[in-house]
Image: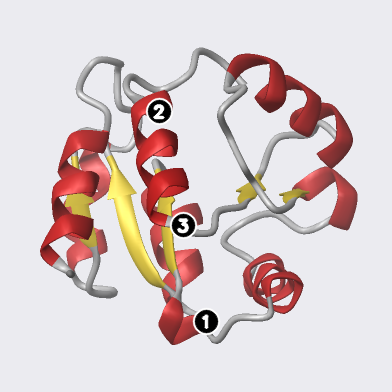
Amino acid sequence: MGAIMPDADKMLDYINVKGIRSAVISNLLWSGEALTERLNRLLPNNRFEFVITSSDYMFRKPNRLLFELALRKAGLDSKDVWYCGDNPQADVEGSAQVGIFPVWYQCTSVTDPHKDEIPKLQLICEYLHIYGWDEMIDELERLK
């Protein structure tokens, strides 16, 4: 896990105030425990209910099993969940295949290795495409 995405702390503050639940599904090869420790150190304002990593379950996103596991852990129906991620296939297609609404976070302040995947992605599922966490906050405010 590299640097924290710009304004991640602002996004976490927003969802904390609004009572929006959150968790993490990651393809990192770290254990969930190791990633949780790092997230708690780098983002002390997080209230992630759980962290699921590929190394703990031997599957990688976009495998639907990781998303289904997260839904079971959270006790939620997929229609009530949004999933934000920066990888069009692993995150957007992966979450969409189980009925979770995908949000593609394409950070403009870092080099995007997935920029050429946009045309393919548009054919696969509906999703929200954001370039910063302020846009996500604006979208959530519009839902009121």
- Secondary structure type for disc 3: loop
Instruction: Inspect the image, locate mark 1, and give the three-letter code of the amino acid beneath it.
Output: Val
Instruction: Inspect the image, locate mark 3, and give the three-letter code of the amino acid beneath it.
Output: Gly
Q: Is residue 85 left or right of residue 112?
A: right
Q: How many marks?
A: 3
User: Residue at image x 24%, y 66%?
Assistant: 127
Q: Find disc 2 in the rendering and name its residue.
A: 8
- Secondary structure type for disc 2: helix
Assess disc 1: are there few (<14), some (14-19) or many (≥20) residues with their C-alpha within 10 Å of its C-alpha.
some
Instruction: Inspect the image, locate mark 2, and give the three-letter code of the amino acid beneath it.
Output: Ala
Q: Which mark is residue 44?
A: none
- Secondary structure type for disc 1: loop
User: Residue at image x 22%, y 46%?
Assistant: 137
Which image quarter: residue 93? bottom left
Give the x, y percent position of residue 9: 42, 25
Instruction: Pick the residue in front: 117 or 38.
Output: 38
Give the x, y percent position of residue 92: 39, 60
Q: Is residue 128 left or right of residue 65?
A: left
Cβ–Cβ under 8 Å for marks 2 and 1: no
Q: CA distance from mark 2 to mark 1?
A: 26 Å
